[in-house]
Amino acid sequence: MKLTKNRNYKLIAGAMILLSIASCKTPGLVEKNANSNVPEQYTTVRDTANSGKICWKKYFNDANLQALIDTALKNNQELNITMQEIEISKNEIKARKGEYLPFVGVKAGAAVDKKARYTNLGAMEATTEIKPGEEMPEPLNDFNLGLYANWEVDIWKKLRNAKKSAVSRYLSSVEGKNFMVTNLVAEIANSYYELLALDNQLDIVNQNITIQSNALEIVKLQKDAARVTELAVKKFEAEVFKTKSLQFDIQQKIVETENRINFLTGRFPEHVKRTSSTFNENLPNVIHTGLPSDLLANRPDIKQAEFELAATKLDVKVARARFYPSLGISAGIGYQAFNPEYIFKPKSLLYSLASDLVAPLVNRNAIKASYNTANAKQIQAVYNYEQTILKAYIEVSNQVSKISNLEKSYALRRQQVEAMNNSVTISNDLFRSARADYMEVLLTQRDALESKFDLVETKMQQLNAMVTIYKALGGGWK
């Protein structure tokens, strides 16, 4: 009784959390209005719509990314393994359904039997006549053919609840597959945008190498004119070598990112087709967060936890039914004779019908342990359900806030890049007129390169945030 009360308390607690989440307002959501300071490009809107319900082919408008996702949904090995797990769950339903239906079989057999003469059975066979004047054959053959059936009457719905539990777990496995699809789509999209970011960083490095090489040539000319020393030339050379080394670091990251995408799509290493110029044009302008209740209905992991909770509730009923008596019925009908010529004679017909009622009496510890385990698993499922809902809710709140802050950060970093580009031009002009030291030129170029890298990194974080909120809203599996 203590366990049952505890379990009911947890179920009520879970229901209260659902009601509280459905009724409260998400912190950090950006309302679309005329006074909003967030640029239109990354505005999140609270209304009845939910961007998570948008098909991934419409959400991701890059044709190359769409092709990669489509390939992954067909070839990803982990997803295919999960599909087979769904088939296993489906077969489990058939197995549980078969347990509460009568089992009917056919049986045929043949045997030979020789009794010892000086035994009671042997003595009776020796003095027994099958017909007047016809002794019992020795050895004695035995032929039989018939049907038999066994059926456990499901009085306490133990077997039917076990079948319903299997159905819930099958539905849970389907939602688990959908959640895996959501994660797979998001992982490919994030990797793809990381690849575009690396391409843009590589272009920045190449442009910077050109700028630094030109500056190196100027320094060499000034050294020939005795305006600077050999130290300045070596400093500029070292900076060029350092920037060139970044090329190979980025190229290695590109190879690793491409192969990560190839692994997710289930193919061997090959070039990933992409258009790096679309780095800033890949996602929708507005994200619709919808209502909190939409989140509960759309996220596959929440529905998976819900089905698992339903299955554990049925498991408790199955475990409790094991304390009660079970009623079994067995029957059989067929023919049996010592000679095949007589096997289908009316006198060779036999049949049986029996029933038994069995109840555990002594040493029920195994049943008690099974019942306690089922209770504990149900409470565990309640905690998991609560945790899944809370996690989903917080993910959406975090990503909405992140989108807003990253947009503001990107605007400032873009201004920083513009200022640093102007600084590079000014420092070069001052250096040519001997009004600036060569170290100022080097530091300005280095800061400009870092600011451009930071700008690309911020843009990639923006794209990742847009992908993550789409996953958090339950998108990607449709």
Image (cartoon, helix red, strand yellow):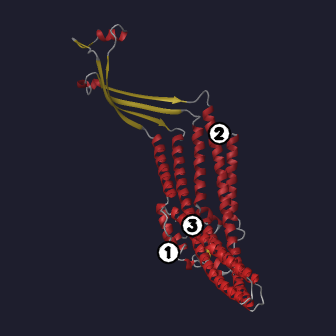
| Coordinates of residue 427 in the picture (x, y in percent) | 73, 87
Which residue position is annotated with label 1?
Answer: 63
Q: Secondary structure at mark 1?
A: helix
Q: Nearer the viewer, mark 1 or mark 2?
A: 1
Along the viewing direction, whichever of 413 and 15 lies nearer the viewer: 413
- Tag of residue 91: none
Number of residues whose C-alpha sits closer than 10 Å to that of mark 1, classed few (under 14), some (14–19) or many (20 or more)? some
Residue type at mark 3: give it.
Thr
Estimate the spatial distance between the alpha carbons at disc 3 and disc 1, rounded to whole Å.
19 Å
Which residue position is annotated with label 3?
Answer: 257
Q: Left of 30 or right of it: where is 339?
A: left
- Of labels 1 and 2, earlier in sequence is 1
| Coordinates of residue 277 in the picture (x, y in percent) | 56, 80
| Coordinates of residue 213 in the picture (x, y in percent) | 64, 83
Number of residues whose C-alpha sits closer than 10 Å to that of mark 2, classed few (under 14), some (14–19) or many (20 or more)? some
Q: Residue at x 61, y 38 (%)?
A: 370
Position of 103 relative to 277 (above/below): above
Residue 444 visible in the shown view: no
Which residue position is annotated with label 2?
Answer: 372
